[in-house]
Each structure stands twice: as C-alpha cells, then as structure tokens.
Image: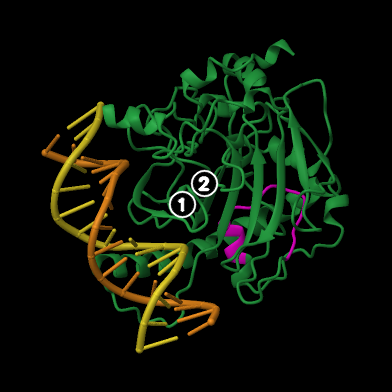
Chain colours: A green, B orange, C yellow
Amino acid sequence: MDKKEELKNNPENSNINMANSTFSDQIPAVYGGFFDTPQGYLDMLAFQDYGGASLFDLLQQPTDPPPNLVAEDQHHNHPTVLSNRLPPPPSAVSAAAEAGETVNTPTQNSSSISSSSNEAANNVDQENINRRSAQEEDIEDDIDDQEKTTNKQLKPKKKNPKKQREPRFAFMTKSEIDHLDDGYRWRKYGQKAVKNSPFPRSYHRCTSVACGVKKRVERSSEDPSIVITTYEGTHTHPYPMTPRGTIGILPENTAYGGLISGGNGGSGGGGGVSSFLFTQPHYQQQQQQQLQPYFHNNQTTPSSSSLSFSTTTNPSVHHPSSFSHFLQERRFCPSPSANSLLRDHGLLQDVVPFQIRKDEPKEEEN
DNA sequence: CGGTTTTGACCAGCGC
DNA sequence: GCGCTGGTCAAAACCG
C-alpha cells in the first residue's frame, strides 16, 4: 500500500496524480478528430473533459453503429474519413475493411453533422447486425490464431510474414486518471517507456477468456492531462453485467446497464474505454436528456476532415445532431435516481475516485 | 490462494 | 547488419 501511495503521489512513477485537478473548472467538452498515427492506423480521437458528458457515455456505442464511420487504411496511411459520429466499434471498422468497403469519404462530413443520422442508423441496423455476425466469425479466427501463438509460450516463430493487426481506436481523454473504467476487466501485461515522452505506456489485455482485445494507455507528452487510450481488437464476449467494483447503478430494464466501476478500489481492474463488438439487444431510447451534444467545426484537429463536438450537461439545451442520435442509443439507462445524479455530473464522474470528485466544483451550481 | 501488477528480458519490425 | 523502438512474455511480487 505504501508503494501505491508513493506511486500515486509521485508523478514520476505514476500518471495517476497528474498535478492538481484542473479539469473541473473547464468547460465540459468533447473534441473528436481523426488522424494518422505513426503506425499507419487511422485513429479516432475523442477528447473529453470530466466536467461534462461521460466519456463512458460517449463510448457506449449504439446498438447499431454506423458503418460509415471510420476507414482504416493500413496500406496507404491516409485518413479516410468518416462521419460525424463517435468512433464505431472496431468491429465496424474491421468489417468494413475486410469487406473492402470504402468507408464514407471525408466529403464535407464536418459540415453535415446533423443530417441523415437517424435514417442512416436505421438503415444500417440490420446491415450492421449481419456484418457483426460475419465479423465475429473472423474474430473468432483471429482469436484462435492468437491463442495458438500465446499458448506456444514465447517465440511462436511467426509464420505470417505480415502480422495482421486488429483495428485500433484511440481516445484522448482529459483526465487525471489513466484508466477509465468501461466495465471490462483488463490485465496489465506490460509497460514500456515511450520515446520522447516522460510517461510510460502500459499494455492491457481483456481478461475474458478468448478475448483478444488489447488496450494501451499512455499520457500525452504534449499535454500530460490527456490520456491516450488505444484499443485494439474486438471483444468476443458480452458486456459484463457486473463489472468489478460496479457502483450498482444497474437499471432493471437494460441488458447492459451499470457499467462503471467505482474507481479501482484497489489494484487492478481499471478499464477504460473499450471496443464494442458483441451483438446486443436493442435498447430503448431513453434518458436522452442527459447528454445533449452540439457540434461545431473544429479547427484544432489535425485533419481537415475531422470534426469535433462538445457536450453540455444542460438538459434544456438540445442540439439535434447525429451525435445526439448516437447518444440516444446509448445502452446505459440509469434509474431515475441515478438519472438525477448523472444529469448533473455525467457518468464519468462515477469513475473518478471520490477523493478527486469531492474537490470538484459542483457543476449543478452553474 | 487466485488474480493482478511489476519489470527485466526477449522478439520483431523498421530505418539507416 | 545493426541499433532503436514498440510490443509481449513470464517469473516474481503484490494484494485482497
């Protein structure tokens, strides 16, 4: 325990306690964008302040993720953009890639934010379901391959000249804590120092058997307050109903409710944003007042075709947008009591350790 | 005692 | 070929 405390209190050893909280007095905002990563992957970024919408909320993918969100071009390194919605589950990406789809071109996406989201989503409902099915098969194959290699202990002596990589998604989260719990359980299997960064990168793997999803967590060297979480792969198992440390907001009427664990009560666990593959029951459209996002053109994102959006927790403000639609499809359906809580704070607050939260200015006082 | 984290070593890919 | 870097492994330590 002493060691832990030491780690927490020493920024050199841990990223958890990055300076004092500054996010609390910032305007709740989520910024999104796309860019090429050094690895040649197209990543989606979503910046999020804790003060507003829950990152978790944002990452609660709709049951029917838009198929036209992200294209990953591993061969040419160019961003294929995308749409105005939050990052699709890796499954959607991989499926599109495997199908050779040209995923939505960048064409004026950032300016057509509020258009056609609903019908598009409706139209792709079944499409996505079918796609996921095929995808899951592929993923199972991938998992098999992975298991083969992992079970071979070290040095599996790769046979594939080119190792195929799962689609990756990166989220940039403005947060003091590195691991934002997404309900999944992760086991850390490595940590490496990152070149040109004072902060190490940690490697995590989903603890579910046969689930090959990996997650990398690192802090931005440019902005230490930003945590970069990168997901690779797709979960092959249902969303955990009662993730470790769940605070207990488990709506009765949702199959995948209560998702947030209460801040890593000890070691382990952690979590973060996750990828979302598994076929899920269609959830009801409700509680949409909790997050009412609005979009705006973003000049800060690296890609001209990128977009950004901000969120506000003010339920009286409604900005029709595809993102809003996305949010309406969130699986998380809090109970009324939880609703009142969440309306003011956003779900991520539940992730933030209490000792951190209690220092935050109360948003509802705005 | 089982699960998780830590951490040094190993391996592969890439650029020079 | 060599060195650098990212990614992974696995034994040991840690923790509840």
Q: Is residue A307 visible in the rendered structure shown here? A: yes
Foreground residue among A292 and A220? A220
The quadrant the N terminus of chain A occupies is top left
Q: Is residue A140 above or below residue A15?
A: below
Q: Position of residue A139 (x, y in %)?
A: 46, 64
| Pointers 2 and 1 in contact (C-beta within 8 Å) | yes
- Residue at the image position 66 percent from the left and 45 percent from the top: A46
Foreground residue among A205 and A60? A205
Q: Position of residue A220 (x, y in %)?
A: 57, 47
Q: Secondary structure at mark 2?
A: loop
- Find residue A135 and name its label: none
Give the residue number, with chain letter if any, for mark 1.
Answer: A215
Q: Residues within 10 Å of mark 2 (few under 14, many from 20)?
A: many
- Find residue A274 and name its label: 2
- Residue at the image position 54 percent from the left and 45 percent from the top: A280
Q: Is residue A60 visible in the rendered structure shown here? A: no
Q: Position of residue A23 (x, y in %)?
A: 63, 28
Magenta segment boundaries in residue numbering: A80-95
* Magenta stretch, overall SS: loop
- Specify the subunit that label 1 lies on: A
Inspect the magenta stretch and tell me whether residue A94 lies in it. yes
- Residue at the image position 45 percent from the left and 45 percent from the top: A238
Q: Position of residue A199 (x, y in %)?
A: 47, 47
Q: Earlier in the sequence, mark 2 or mark 1?
A: 1
Quadrant in which residue A99 is drawn: bottom right
Quadrant in which residue A30 is drawn: top right
Instruction: Measure how far apart labels 2 and 1 are at the Cα level.
Output: 8 Å
**Side of A209 relative to A335 (left or right):** left
The quadrant the C terminus of chain A occupies is top right
Amino acid type, callout 1: Lys
